[in-house]
Image (spheres, helix red, strand yellow):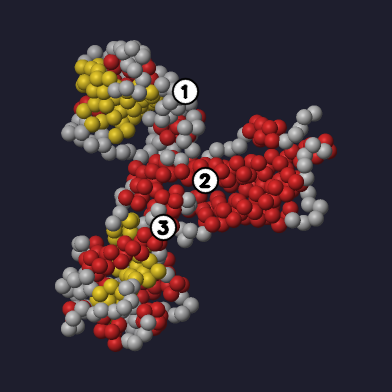
Amino acid sequence: MLMGISYLLTPIRRISNTTIFALSSGFGKCGVAVVRVSGPETKTAITSLTKTVPSTKNLKPRYASLRKLWHPKTNDLIDKGLVLFFPAPHSFTGEDCCEFQVHGSPAVVSAICDALNSIDGFRPALAGEFAKRAFRNEKLDLIEIEGLADLIHAETDIQRKQALLQADGALSSVYAEWRQTLLRAVACFEAYIDFAEDDDIEPETINQVQSDVDKLINEIERFLNDSRKGEMRRNGVKTAILGEPNVGKSSFMNHICQKPISIVASIEGTTRDIVESSFNIAGFPVVIADTAGLRHHTHDPIEKEGIQRAKQYAAEADLIILIVDVNKLLASDMSLHEFKRKHLNKMGITEDNEIMQKEIIVIANKCDLVDKTPVMQDNDIVFVSCTENHGIDGALKKIEETLRQLTDYSPLGLAHVPPNERHRQFLVKCLQHLREFKTYSSSDGFDFSIAAVYLRESQHQLENISGRTIHIEEMYDFIFKQFCIGK
């Protein structure tokens, strides 16, 4: 069984010409430990510990070989394990790499690390150094590294799938296509500025740039207009349980979480502060919170503060679970939409409150107090009895359906949304510069040099996401290959 270890990033200048090693995974005495080595002296590590020289004959690249492992200084036998050699550039870091897969006991791992540390020019890896070298050698970009980190920390199936797609380059390919569009646009303007007097650049080229920018603006706007689905899948769907005092919010919270997180009592106002828990429902990450009971008037200053906190949390939530008394629901002759509006008004949530615009699931509790389970035409209402644990499965199913809708659970949806706030911020700035270019270039007699600045700024924002900068030679190659500049 393997357990991953995450690392922080370190400056490139500190890792340039050294050979590093680290325990990349392991699980106690009964599992397997993997000690990874990367750097120019990787073959020395193999030779020193196995007493064999890596070659196609006795240690075929990317094939596991069973070898005895020895300490190079004491000549003590450490263990017998699998050795794999990955020659540059076809390795995770882009350098020569090898792995020693040994028994996972602390004594074996300690002896392997001590043996490597005893070799001149070797040192333990700094936090995140393997990923840093992979980035430096252009094996991974920042987007793929973020996906790899998310994959290591994934706790639900949705998080795993999104992280895997990102680590595999699905999101990078989207940004790369936009990057190519901007490269073409910048190259067109640069060529026009430098070579327009040669009359070898067709005027239609500028029109094509403006058309491409229009298309790119629309694509980025659609990309950002995702209601933060990617962030919900990555960080969890923030969910608030709302309702009047003593309606069963805490009982429902405990049933959903399957443990006594909230205090349950017949006394009104038991919950005063936010009681939050993270878990998953059918593979979807959820951060759910039990809140204070809402009502218009109270003279208790602590209850007032609890109500204020409940409203604030609900305003920031992605999903609202509204718990209502089944008798009050059945006594009303309103549509579900009208009932929700009136009921929230009664609890002090006005029409202009942003909570009204949230996705709201209505759970009618205390069905054990009516003669028989109510049947209503509206399938959006779920009837439960928290006292008798009745209808909870139906409530979970309704929540799961809503989560699928909120997070756009599809292969296309998983790969084509910003996964975190870092991406979103740079994309917003990119979009701003593109709009400035569009506005400026639409005026008569605009200056091509100034217009090109807007394009370069938008290009720079995309580069910040991937960490890859367009080199000047790449720009020159594009200009001379794409345009008829033959003089």
Q: In percent of the image, x 24 and y 80: which residue is there?
A: 374
> Would residue 416 be found to the left or right of residue 31 on screen?
right
- Looking at numbered disc 1 in the image, what kind of residue is underneath it? Asn
> Would residue 232 be found to the left or right of residue 243 on screen?
right
Q: In percent of the image, x 20 and y 30: which residue is there?
A: 105
CA–CA distance in space, label 3 to label 1:
45 Å
Q: Quadrant of residue 260?
A: bottom left
Q: In percent of the image, x 79 and y 37: which residue is there?
A: 200
Does the residue at mark 3 contact the one at mark 2 (Cβ under 8 Å)?
no
Q: Name the residue under label 3.
A: 408
Residue 454, image x, y percentages: 68, 49
Residue 402, image x, y percentages: 36, 64
**Marks 1 and 2, the one that precedes in the sequence:** 1
- Mark identifier at residue 218: none
Q: Which of 92 and 311 is in front in this view?
A: 92
Secondary structure, mark 2, is helix
> Would residue 150 be found to the left or right of residue 1 on screen?
right
Q: Mark 1 points at which residue?
A: 17
Q: Mark 2 points at which residue?
A: 174
Q: Which of 286 and 414 is in front in this view?
A: 414
